[in-house]
Image (cartoon, helix red, strand yellow):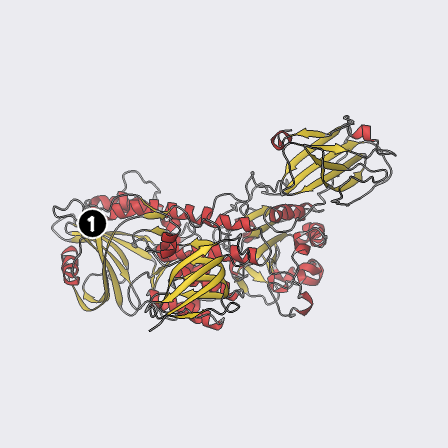
Amino acid sequence: MSLQSQSSPEAQKYDIVIVGAGPVGLMLSTCLARWGYKIKHIDNRPEPTQTGRADGIQPRSLDLLRNMGLKSPLMAHKPARVYEVAFWDPAKEGTGIARTGTWASCPSFIDARYPFTTLLHQGHIERVFLADLAKHNVEVQRPWTIKGFTSNEAENPEYPVEVQLEHVDGKASETLRAKYLFGGEGARSFVREQLNIGIKHKDPIEHVWGVMDGVVQTDFPDIQMKCTIHSEHGSIMVIPREDNMVRLYIQIASSTDPDWHPRKTATAEDVQASAQRILQPYTISWERVEWYSVYPIGQGLGDRYTLDCRVFLGGDAVHTHSPKAGQGMNTAFLDAQNLAWKIHLVEAGFADRSVLQTYEQERRQVAESLLDFDNRYAKLFSQRPTAASEAEAALKKKDTGSSEGENAFIKAFKEACEFTSGYGVAYQPNVLNWSPSHPARSPVINPTGSTLRTGRLLINANVTRVVDANVVHLEQEVPMNGSFRIFVFAGKPSVTAGALTDFANKLQSKDSFYMAYQRPDQDQVSYHEQHNPHSLFFTFCTIFSERRSNIEISRHVPSLLARYRAHIYADDQWDRRMPDAKAAAHAKAGLDEEKGGVVVVRPDGYVGMVAQLVEGSGTVDALNEYFGAFTTKKLGQKLRRDRRRIEDRHTSVEVKYDRGLSIRVHANHTAKHRKEVNKPRRDTEPISVPDFPFLALFNNRNSFIDQANVFTSLHLNTLTLDFHFPLLWLPQPFQISRFVKTTGPFSSNALFSSSSSVLRGTYDELLSR
C-alpha cells in the first residue's frame, strides 16, 4: 500500500509537538493544553502503560498534582502510602535477617503537607493525565513515531520547526510545522540522537538488578512497608503497591562475581529463588507475577537539554539512573513543569525568549545532584551487608543527630531525605531567582531577617481566608495557571496602612509591571474570576497579621487588591514550627509581623524575590526592577526620586547597562521650580529643547544614533536627570555628548565641566567608571 501523506498547510501548524506520552510528556502537554496551546502529541505505544515502569510519587510531586487538581483522581485508586522505611540486615546471632530499625520516609524536619511516598502503578497515573487532556480537546496520537525534524528560525521565525511523523506501520505520515518540539521519549530518544547530544555516564555498570511486580503470600512482617534488606545472599528493596501488590527490586549480579557480565539476565523463576534465599528465615511465594524486568544500574546525563531553545529534551531522554530512590517520574514532572510555564511566558508576550535558557540551567543542575546521590546510594545498597549491630547503632543515633560511625547506607539515606522528597531542590541565581548580582538593585530587596531563599519553594503556611473563614493552605491557593504569585504580607493594618495604599497606587503608574500587562478583555472578565481579573501575568494575595474578625476588606484593603477578595487572608493560625509567633506565616518567612513584606513567587511555586513593604514607590520600584530584567516591556523607567537633603554642592554621574544604557546625573543647586520631560527621539539630527539639557549617543564617526529618554526631578536642592538609551544600540567606541546649553537656575557648565563630551570611550570603560 502506498504511503498516505497528510499535508493541509493551515491545519498542520502547532504551538508544540510532544514526542512521548510518559510522565514528562503528559505533564508538559497537560499544562500547555490548559493554557490554550495547540498541541500535537504522539507516542509509539498503541496504549498507555499496562504494567511496570515508575510508581513512586514523592511529597513535593503530590503538592504539585494537588495544585493542578489531579491529586484526588490519583488517590481514588487507593495507592499505598509509605510513611516509614524499615532496615533489615543479617541477624547478630544465627542465620537469616533481622529488622535493625526504621526511619521516616519524610522526616519531621521537612515541612511537608504529605509526609509520605505515594505508590501507584504508572498506568493509572498516565490515565489521570489523559483524562484531563481530553477535557481540553487534546488526544495522544498512537502509535505514531517521529522520523525527522529541522529547526530554522531564519527561514520561518514563527514556526521554525518542521517535523516528520509516521505511523509505526509505515502506512501513513504527516509533515507539520511547530514553534517548539519536545523529546520526552525516554533513554533511546530519537530527538536527542538527531541533535547529536551525548549522554555522559558516571561510572561503568557494576550491578544488575531484577524488578518484579506481583501478588505474594509471605510471613515477612514488613511486606506492607518500604524495606531495604541486606543479607549474606544479596539485597532486596520492598515497595508496597495498590491492589495487594508488592514490587521487589532484587540483586542479580555484581562485578565481583566470577561470571560477571553487565548484560546478564535471569528468568523470573531465578529471581524468585534469589528472593526466597535473601528473605530467610521468612518464606515468600507468588500468587501471580504482573511484570518482570532486568536492568543494569547506571547514571547518565545529557550534555545539553536544548541547542536553540526551540527543540527541547526532558525526563529520561536526558537523565537516567536507578529506580530505587523513586526519583525518575518525579524529576520528569518537574522538568515538564519548569519548561511549560517558561514557554507560556514567552508565547503570551510576557517574557523575553532568553528565559527559555534557564530551563537547562535549572533542571540540568538538579539532574546532576540526583545522579550524584543515586550513584552513591545504588553502590551502597548493592554492597555486601554490615553486621546488624552496626546498623542498630546507626539508627539509635537518630535522636542525637550524630553521624559519627553510622552505617554508610543508612547515613546516605538520612542525608538525602530532603532532596528525595522534592523539597530540597534549590535553583541557582539567574534572572528569575534574585541574588546580589541580579539587575534589580533596589535597597528594599532581600530584607534583613527573611528566611525565604530565592530558588527554593515558598514555605507552607495555614491561614484563614477572610471572605469565608476557611482555614486554607496558603501555598496552594493559586493554582498552577502560569501566573506569578505576588504575596503581599501586609503585617498589622494599623502599621502598614500607608505603605499598602502607596503600593496599590504605585501599581497603577503607567510604567509599572501591573499596567504593562493588563488583560485586553478586562471589561468582560467575570465578577467571579478569582485569580486573574487584571492580568494573566500575575495574581495578588494579601495576608494580614491580624485575626480574621478584625479585618474589614472595605476598610483595610485598597480597591485594587480588594478585587482579589478570595485571596485576602488572616495570619491567625498556630503553627507547631513557630509556637510563639502571633503571625506564623509572617514568622516562617522571616518577615516582620507588623511591617510585613512582599514575596514574588514564580508560577512553579519557587521564590523569585523578596522585598520590604514600604511607604512611597520603593516596593513597586523593586518589583519593576525584578520583572523588568526579563519582561518584554521596559518597566519603571521613571526611577525612584531622591528625597534626601544633600548639603554639599557637587555633580555626579552614575552609569549602568541593564536592558539599555542608563545615565543618572545629580546636580546640587537651589531652585524653586521642577520640570519633567520624556521626549525620546530618532531624528537624524539632534534637536534643541529650551532651558533643558539633553544627551545624545554618537558612534565613532560622530553619526547620531539615538536620543535618550530623559526624566528629571527636583527635590529640595538636588536636580536629578535620568537618561536611558534603548537596548542593542551601543556602538564601540562611542561618545555621549551634551548638545544644548541651559539657562535659568541650572547652567550647563554647572552640570558638566567638559564643553564637548560628557563620556567617551568603549562600553567596558563606561561601565568601569
State left or right for residue 724 relative to residue 385: right
Tell me the quadrant of the picture where the N terminus can be found.
bottom left
Q: Secondary structure at mark 1?
A: loop
Residue 60 appears in which quarter of the rendering?
Answer: bottom left
Judging depth in this view, the residue of 665 and 252 nearest the camera is: 665
Residue 456 makes an appearance in the image: no
Tell me the quadrant of the picture where the C terminus can be found.
top right
x and y percentages locating residue 78 in the rendered image = 35, 69
Image point (34%, 43%), residue name? 400
State left or right for residue 281 relative to residue 99: left
Q: Amino acid at mark 1?
A: Pro
Residue 541 appears in which quarter of the rendering?
Answer: bottom right
Judging depth in this view, the residue of 569 and 43 nearest the camera is: 43
x and y percentages locating residue 493 in the rendered image = 67, 54
x and y percentages locating residue 94 in the rendered image = 11, 50
x and y percentages locating residue 49 in the rendered image = 32, 67
Q: Which residue is denoted by mark 1 in the rendering?
A: 262
Residue 209 makes an appearance in the image: yes
Q: Residue furthest front?
A: 2
State left or right for residue 184 relative to residue 569: left
Vertical position of residue 445 compared to residue 18: above or below? above
Vertical position of residue 485 compared to residue 30: above or below? above
State left or right for residue 737 relative to residue 470: right
Dot 1 crowding, Cα within 10 Å, few <14, some 14–19, many 20+: some
Judging depth in this view, the residue of 265 and 79 nearest the camera is: 265
Residue 682 appears in which quarter of the rendering?
Answer: top right
Judging depth in this view, the residue of 710 and 63 nearest the camera is: 710
Disc tally is 1
Vertical position of residue 419 compared to residue 469: above or below? above
Image point (14%, 53%), residue name? 96
